[in-house]
Image (cartoon, rainbow, N blue to C red):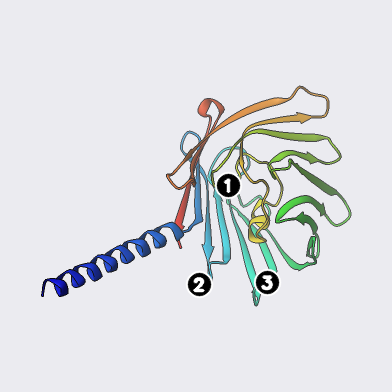
């Protein structure tokens, strides 16, 4: 009888240990998905919400600018898929001021191994990439103006420089936080078409830079420092710029 009792106890222990291990595995496999940012400077002045479909693909990105600098607006970037591939991206601005002109551009998206092309009636974008990272962005505004952006990274895929328009403007980055999740909104890194890059699943840097410097033509460089706050899993939750001029809160949902 005692022997049967001990066997039952052992089986129960193994079961409990197994359940505990499974629970730990489930906890470790939880993934947080970028949902929203809120940017503050003397109050909320900007926010952005990412909406997903049932397959966790980006369905739309809705941004609102409330005050400061350019006129307030709502921007909606929406996505259509052909099976698992992005087929079109529509980028629409709705300005609060009736004197500003609302815009809407729909891009047809095509790609090969190292290049993604977005073609609309008025604007064409070519994105060169490798190993999941952006190498260059060339935007042709109907032949009237061409905007060029080139990105350079080190051997660890950390972004060290972004060069705009044939070196008229160069942004350099350094002092990277390692072993953390990359900032999903990339507020420190200045680059064009940021939301389109996110939709296409392309990255700018492997780690978050805490120092940036900008050089415009021959003018002295302007250096800025940033501080990040992370949760216990390494996801960024808040970004401060130098002197706390503004800060950004980042929110997630769990998959």
Q: Is residue 245 above or below residue 61?
A: above
Which residue has dot 2 on it?
A: 54
Mark 1 vs mark 3, foreground winner is 1
Report the residue marked by disc 3.
Answer: 85
Instruction: Give above or below for 196 relative to 153.
Output: below
Q: How many marks?
A: 3
Work out whether residue 36 or residue 33 is closer to the camera in this orientation and state it: 33
Q: Nearer the viewer, residue 1 or 86?
A: 1
Horizontal and vertical percent position of residue 181: 54, 47
State the image coordinates of residue 186 (x, y, percent, origin top left).
61, 45
Asked whether the viewer can see residue 190, the reply is: yes
- Is 93 left, or right, of 108 in this rendering? left
Is the residue marked by circle 1 packed among few (<14), some (14-19), or many (20+) residues within 10 Å?
some
Distance from the alpha carbon under mark 1 to that under mark 3:
24 Å
Where residue 22 appears, x then y in whole percent? 37, 65
Identity of the residue drawn at 46% across and 54% down: 252
Pick whichever, 74 or 62, lies toward us: 62
Earlier in the chain: of badge 2 and badge 1, it is: 2
Asked whether residue 102 appears in the rendered view, the answer is no
Determine the secondary structure under disc 2: loop
102, above or below 220, in the image: below
Q: Is residue 31 left or right of residue 69?
A: left
What residue occupies the far right of the structure in this picture?
A: 143
Rendered residue at 82%/54% (across/down): 141
Q: In this rendering, which labeled residue sits more in front, label 2 or label 1?
A: 1
SS category of the residue bearing label 1: loop
Q: Residue at x 83, y 41 (%)?
A: 165
Residue on which disc 1 sits: 182
Residues tagged 1 and 3 counted as in contact (Cβ below 8 A): no
Residue 220 falls in which quadrant of the image? top right
């Amino acid at each position: 009888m005692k022997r049967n009792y001990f066997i039952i106890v052992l089986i129960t222990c193994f079961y409990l240990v197994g359940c505990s291990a499974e629970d730990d595995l489930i906890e470790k496999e939880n993934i947080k998905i970028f949902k929203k940012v809120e940017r503050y400077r003397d109050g909320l002045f900007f926010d952005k919400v990412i909406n997903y479909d049932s397959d966790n693909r980006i369905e739309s990105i809705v941004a609102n600018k409330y005050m400061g600098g350019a006129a307030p607006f709502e921007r909606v970037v929406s996505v259509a898929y052909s099976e698992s591939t992005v087929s079109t991206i529509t980028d629409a601005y709705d300005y609060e001021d009736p004197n500003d002109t609302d815009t809407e551009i729909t891009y047809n998206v095509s790609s090969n191994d190292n290049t993604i092309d977005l073609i609309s009636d008025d604007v064409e974008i070519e994105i060169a990439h490798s190993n999941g990272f952006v190498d260059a962005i060339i935007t042709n505004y109907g032949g009237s103006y061409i905007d060029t952006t080139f990105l350079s990274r080190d051997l660890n895929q950390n972004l060290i420089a972004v060069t705009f328009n044939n070196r008229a403007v160069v942004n350099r980055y350094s002092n990277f936080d390692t072993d953390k999740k990359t900032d999903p909104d990339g507020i420190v890194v200045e680059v064009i078409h940021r939301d389109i890059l996110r939709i296409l699943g392309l990255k700018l840097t492997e780690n978050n830079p805490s120092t940036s410097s900008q050089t415009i033509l021959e003018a002295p460089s302007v250096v800025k420092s940033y501080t990040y706050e992370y949760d216990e899993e390494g996801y960024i939750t808040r970004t401060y710029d130098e002197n706390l001029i503004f800060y950004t809160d980042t929110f997630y949902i769990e998959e």
